[in-house]
Image (tube, rainbow, N blue to C red):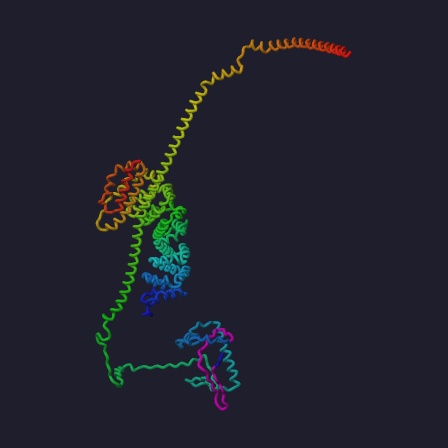
């Protein structure tokens, strides 16, 4: 806590104390140890709970209007009795101040150097004032201060400061002008958009129209070409069939012609190959003649053998004769 | 003047060239309130094309928006999307959005918790499809959008406005390339939407269906899902746009043979003839009505032309020939309708 206070005691002077005024700090009920931060806790004295507010008479009334507690009352009575007894006892020993006379009261007064604060005793004074009821209050005289200086007047006449109608014109112009400008812009914008959309729509319609026509023609073309293709294929089929039929007919005619003289040729050929024969003749041919020939061969063989034998004999004879002759010759 | 805020919901705007950069600096403040006010002021400014140019070409402004997409406060996210919505009203804005890296986080926001944020995101995507390159970039998102349209079980379906926006975006994307939508089973889903009670949804659903049925696969699916009776019913609808779109779908579907057979079975020829021959009624609004009627009449004529290629249809249409002849005469003011009617007459009179 920063004490901005000075107190010094001069040796022959009384104690003086001076401090800078500082606002009362807001301390909580249960006091914490003082810290450096209490500067910020200064409170408004008007809202300080320690400051007594309101009627101070009420402070005395409350204790007397409280309900007397019977136990408390009894205790208090006993205390009083004891105090009186003690007092009597004490009075016997020491002289005390005499009792106050009638109509007077003893009161304690502080006479020391250091005054104590008596917190229970609240000094209050009543002051009353009351005018005399029957005296009428005279009228207060008008207080006119003494005139000093010069009297000066001024008055703003009509039309001197400014002419409202003329002055308001530029402001009005600006306001109205801006509003109209803004709205004109917006309207133009919308018109432009509407124009754009209308143009686009017209274009779209024409485009759709033409597109439909194009697609229709395309479709038509497709259909027609398909149809054409089909018909051409059909025609080709027909031609092929015709050709086949013609070929078949030609083949049949040729075959018929070819096979017409097959039969006599076959018979002729068979006959020429000897498949038709006379059995007796064949038999004679196959059996008789070989036997005959064989027999003829045999007999001829025999003849040949005989001839050969003869030849051999002749040959021998002649050789021998020759030999004999030669022998004879040589002889 | 700058000290007192005239409108407490908007941040003060600096003068001239400094306005946009200062507001973007304001966007980096940690308090959500100030960011919201800065965004509101930016939304006001973005109606001017020159400011958009400044924003788009300025250093790194669009990247800041990237950070704002992940803000915790949903109203900040909603306002950011609204800002983008206003920026995409102009072509530079759209192109800038495409060339910046803002599309992936934007597509994340489609799943956002707050419904107003989702609505604004859909508005941005819708405006983006005004640019063909934008529609191209959104093609990858188409399956996700289809899922949103379907609504998952247990989750409420999106509100009507969001559905209309979704359908419109899908129709623009499908015009470029119908395959992603077809692959996500688009035809059956749209068949449900065709019987919705709101005419806007019906109109947009029919438009998407028209874009889908351009390709062969789509036509086949339309026939398979037996959507043709529903479409024929839609031809009697009050709203002329719905009628036109339904006629468009029919026009594409009858090009294939299955479609022709189904339509002839459903006896759609008299209805189409009636649509073709109805005269325009009032004089006022004639121009607008004529424009929308023109589409209807053209589509019906084309559908009739396609139906005339089937022998059954041709026979019936030969009886009704004078009607079409009238339309093909030179008195018909509209050149396109006259040409269409002449084509129809020619096809009907064709002999093999």
Looking at the image, which is closer to me, A49 or B260? B260
Measuring 51% from the left and 78% from the top, which residue is drawn there?
A82
Q: Position of residue A322 (x, y in %)?
A: 73, 11
A313 above or below A238?
A: above
Q: Main secondary structure of the magenta part?
A: loop
Q: Position of residue B249 (x, y in %)?
A: 33, 44
Q: Quadrant of the C terminus of chain A?
A: top right
Q: Is residue B273 at least partly visible in the picture?
A: yes
Classify residue A176 by image quadrant.
bottom left
Tell me, yes or no, whether the highlighted magenta stretch contains residue A16. yes
Per the rendered image, the range of residues in magenta is A4-33
A316 above or below A220?
A: above
Q: Is residue A63 at least partly visible in the picture?
A: no
Furthest-bottom residue in this view: A12
Looking at the image, which is closer to me, A226 or B30? A226
Q: Position of residue A107 (x, y in %)?
A: 45, 84
B237 above or below A84?
A: above
Looking at the image, which is closer to me, A35 or B170? B170
Q: How many marks?
A: 0
Q: Position of residue B153 (x, y in %)?
A: 41, 49
Q: Specify whether A32 is left or right of B18.
A: right
Looking at the image, which is closer to me, B115 or A292? A292
Classify residue A49 by image quadrant.
bottom left
Furthest-right residue in this view: A331
Tell me, yes or no, whether the highlighted magenta stretch contains residue B240. no
Q: Specify whether A299 is left or right of B207.
A: right
B129 above or below B270?
A: below
């Amino acid at each position: 806590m920063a004490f901005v206070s000075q107190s010094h005691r001069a040796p022959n002077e009384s104690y003086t104390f001076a401090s800078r005024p500082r606002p009362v700090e807001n301390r909580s009920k249960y006091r914490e140890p003082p810290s450096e931060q209490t500067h910020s806790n200064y409170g408004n004295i008007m809202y300080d709970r320690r400051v007594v507010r309101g009627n101070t008479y009420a402070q005395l009334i409350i204790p007397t209007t409280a309900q007397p507690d019977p136990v408390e009352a009894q205790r208090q009575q006993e205390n009083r009795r004891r105090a009186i007894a003690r007092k009597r006892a004490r009075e016997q020993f020491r002289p005390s101040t005499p009792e106050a006379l009638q109509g007077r009261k003893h009161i304690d007064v502080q006479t020391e150097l250091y005054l104590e604060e008596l917190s229970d005793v609240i000094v209050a004074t009543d002051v009353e004032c009351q005018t005399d009821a029957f005296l009428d209050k005279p009228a207060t005289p008008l207080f006119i201060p003494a005139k000093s200086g010069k009297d000066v007047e001024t008055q703003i006449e009509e039309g001197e400061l400014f002419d409202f109608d003329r002055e308001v014109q530029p402001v009005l112009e600006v306001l109205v002008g801006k509003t109209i400008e803004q709205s004109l812009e917006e309207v133009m914008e919308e018109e432009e958009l509407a124009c754009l959309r209308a143009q686009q729509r017209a274009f779209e319609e024409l485009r759709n129209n033409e597109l439909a026509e194009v697609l229709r023609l395309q479709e038509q073309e497709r259909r027609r070409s398909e149809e054409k293709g089909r018909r051409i294929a059909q025609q080709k089929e027909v031609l092929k069939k015709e050709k086949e039929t013609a070929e078949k007919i030609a083949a049949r005619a040729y075959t018929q012609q070819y096979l017409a003289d097959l039969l006599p040729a076959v018979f002729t050929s068979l006959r020429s190959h000897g498949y038709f024969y006379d059995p007796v003749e064949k038999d004679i041919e196959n059996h008789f003649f070989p036997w005959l020939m064989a027999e003829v061969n045999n007999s001829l063989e025999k003849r040949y053998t005989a001839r050969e034998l003869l030849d051999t004999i002749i040959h021998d004879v002649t050789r021998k004769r020759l030999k004999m002759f030669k022998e004879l010759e040589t002889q | 003047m700058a000290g007192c805020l005239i409108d407490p919901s908007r941040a003060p705007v600096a003068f001239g060239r400094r306005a946009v950069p200062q507001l973007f600096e304001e966007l980096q403040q940690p308090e959500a309130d100030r960011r919201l006010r800065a965004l509101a002021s930016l939304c006001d400014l973005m109606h001017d094309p020159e400011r958009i140019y400044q924003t788009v070409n300025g250093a790194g402004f669009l990247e800041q928006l990237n950070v704002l997409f992940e803000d915790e406060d949903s109203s900040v996210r909603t306002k950011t999307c609204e800002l983008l919505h206003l920026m995409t009203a102009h072509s530079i804005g759209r192109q800038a959005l495409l060339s910046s890296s803002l599309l992936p986080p934007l597509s994340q926001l489609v799943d956002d918790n707050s419904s107003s944020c989702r609505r604004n995101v859909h508005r941005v995507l819708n405006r983006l499809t005004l640019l063909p390159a934008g529609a191209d970039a959104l093609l990858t998102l188409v399956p996700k959008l289809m899922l949103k349209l379907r609504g998952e079980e247990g989750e409420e379906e999106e509100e009507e406005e969001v559905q209309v926006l979704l359908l419109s975006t899908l129709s623009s994307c499908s015009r470029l390339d119908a395959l992603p939508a077809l692959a996500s089973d688009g035809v059956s889903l749209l068949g449900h939407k065709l019987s919705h009670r709101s005419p806007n949804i019906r109109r947009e659903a029919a438009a998407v269906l028209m874009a889908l049925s351009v390709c062969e696969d789509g036509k086949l699916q339309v026939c398979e899902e037996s959507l043709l009776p529903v479409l024929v019913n839609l031809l009697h609808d009050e709203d002329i746009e719905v009628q036109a779109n339904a006629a468009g779908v029919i026009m594409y579907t009858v090009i294939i043979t299955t479609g022709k057979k189904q339509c002839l079975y459903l006896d759609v020829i008299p209805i189409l003839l009636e649509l073709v021959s109805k005269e325009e009624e009032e004089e006022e609004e004639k121009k607008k009505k004529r424009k929308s009627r023109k589409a209807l009449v053209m589509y019906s004529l084309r559908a009739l032309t396609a139906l005339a290629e089937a022998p059954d249809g041709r026979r019936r249409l030969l009886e009704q020939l004078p009607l079409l002849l009238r339309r093909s005469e030179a008195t018909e003011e509209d050149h396109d309708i006259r040409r269409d009617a002449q084509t129809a007459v020619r096809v009907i009179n064709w002999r093999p």
